[in-house]
């Protein structure tokens, strides 16, 4: 194990303010978090690692009561916040700030534009891009323990030390290739508040096979899922500790209308029944008398006929050619679902952001018969009939 690099261990509001004031003068900061969420509804933020050049720090969020300086840094629009696979970090910071940090740069989103796999993990990207193999021994570590062992601090710091290197090099390459602006819509999508602010009344839509139910059963599922979400937030415990999805369905099917009847639901956890039994019965009785919310429209995959399958193969051939020329994964340039929509007549609207100017005209002209493909020593060539 290499020596832990020089860094600041921040465990007071005063030291945090000093660090964040300095970081707010920098153009970007690499950020990562360590947290636990197995025993709580809200993830418990334990550590925040930050880096910009000589400024390298671990922020002990469990030791600091006032994190306002960190909040101000996260919401400072003059500083780019650099993450890898940002969604979990952004969820945590949304709960801290009631806003989503922006602007941001996500190296996982950027990697495919430089020829790497979609959804590539941080360790694999550092290994493939920088030739460094990171330790994996602390992936499931307890980040609430104090003091933190030296090995855990090293592990945590590595997450921003190499993240900064990735960002600096990726930013330079993307700028040189004039692809940096392609990512802006993707990053803006990551920063949308609605991704992290989920209404309790919408949670029922995530229950598996909910579309099978109707009438009172559906109404009970909807209201129990809403009750569970609100109660999980109030008690800060995982929603499945209160009621698992299959228990909600069982309650909706059997509709117990008393505490005695509730005892016959064998899958219902005894602690939940003893503590919240009457609330559950009241929810079930009330929901039985309500009209359910409408189910979301079913999205049935349209089966392609022989002609459309052939057209799809034609588009795929050109996508692979262009993707090779651009050094981009074909599935990133034009995902299969997008191509299927195009051949069934949904138009090129499915091509989002930077994809449309790169390949939209080509695909449309192929579909309309305005262009043809020919093979040559370099692969395929597109020819206009005009």
Image (cartoon, rainbow, N blue to C red):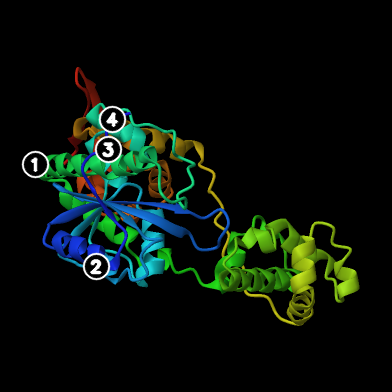
SS label for mark 4 = loop
Asked whether the beta carbons under mark 1 and mark 4 sit within 8 Å of each other, the answer is: no
The image quadrant of residue 185 is bottom left
| Image spot of residue 57 (x, y percent) | 25, 51
Asked whether the beta carbons under mark 2 and mark 3 sit within 8 Å of each other, the answer is: no
**Residue occupied by mark 4:** 2
Q: Name the side, left or right, on which 344 lies relative to 83.
A: right
- Comes first in the chain, label 2 or label 1: 2
**Discs 1/3, front:** 3
Q: Name the side, left or right, on which 35 lies relative to 168.
A: right
Residue 239 higher or lower than 99, as above or below: above
Asked whether the beta carbons under mark 2 and mark 1 sit within 8 Å of each other, the answer is: no
- Comes first in the chain, label 1 or label 3: 3
- In space, the residues marked 1 and 4 are separated at their CA atoms by 35 Å
- In space, the residues marked 1 and 3 are separated at their CA atoms by 34 Å
- In space, the residues marked 4 and 2 are separated at their CA atoms by 30 Å
**Discs 2/1, front:** 2
- Comes first in the chain, label 2 or label 3: 3
**Residue occupied by mark 1:** 176
- In space, the residues marked 2 and 1 are separated at their CA atoms by 41 Å
Closer-to-camera residue (112/351): 112
Closer-to-camera residue (128/41): 41
| Image spot of residue 148 (x, y percent) | 40, 46
Q: Residue furthest top?
A: 377
State the mark number for residue 4: 3
**Residue occupied by mark 2:** 14
């Amino acid at each position: 194990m290499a020596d832990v690099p020089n860094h600041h261990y921040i465990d007071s509001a005063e030291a945090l303010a000093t660090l964040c004031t300095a970081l707010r003068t920098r153009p970007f900061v690499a950020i990562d978090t360590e947290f636990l969420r197995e025993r709580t509804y809200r993830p418990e933020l334990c550590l925040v690692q930050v880096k910009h050049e000589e400024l390298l720090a671990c922020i002990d969020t469990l030791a600091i009561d006032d994190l306002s300086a960190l909040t101000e840094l996260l919401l400072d629009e003059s500083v780019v916040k650099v993450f890898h696979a940002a969604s979990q970090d952004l969820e945590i910071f949304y709960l801290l700030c009631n806003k989503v940090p922006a602007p941001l740069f996500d190296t996982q989103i950027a990697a495919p534009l430089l020829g790497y796999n979609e959804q590539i993990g941080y360790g694999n990207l550092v290994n493939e891009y920088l030739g460094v193999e990171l330790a994996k021994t602390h992936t499931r570590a307890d980040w609430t323990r104090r003091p933190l062992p030296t090995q855990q601090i090293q592990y945590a710091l590595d997450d921003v030390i190499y993240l900064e290197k990735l960002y600096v090099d990726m930013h330079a390459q993307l700028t040189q290739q004039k692809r940096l602006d392609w990512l802006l819509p993707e990053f803006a999508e990551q920063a949308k508040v609605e991704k992290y602010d989920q209404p309790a009344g919408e949670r029922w839509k995530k229950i598996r096979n909910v579309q099978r139910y109707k009438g009172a059963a559906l109404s009970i599922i909807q209201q129990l899922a809403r009750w569970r979400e609100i109660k999980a937030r109030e008690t800060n415990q995982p929603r499945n500790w209160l009621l698992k999805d299959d228990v909600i369905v069982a309650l909706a099917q059997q509709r117990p209308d008393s505490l005695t009847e509730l005892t016959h639901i064998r899958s219902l956890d005894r602690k939940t029944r003893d503590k919240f039994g009457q609330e559950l019965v009241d929810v079930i009785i009330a929901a039985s008398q309500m009209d359910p919310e409408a189910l979301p429209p079913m999205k049935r995959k349209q089966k392609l006929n022989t002609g459309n399958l052939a057209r799809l193969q034609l588009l795929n051939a050109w996508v692979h050619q262009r993707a090779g020329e651009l050094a981009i994964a074909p599935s990133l340039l034009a995902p299969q679902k997008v191509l299927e929509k195009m051949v069934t007549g949904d138009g090129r609207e499915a091509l989002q952001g930077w994809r449309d100017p790169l390949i939209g005209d080509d695909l449309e002209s192929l579909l309309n018969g305005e262009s043809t493909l020919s093979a040559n020593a370099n692969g395929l060539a597109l020819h206009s009939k005009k």
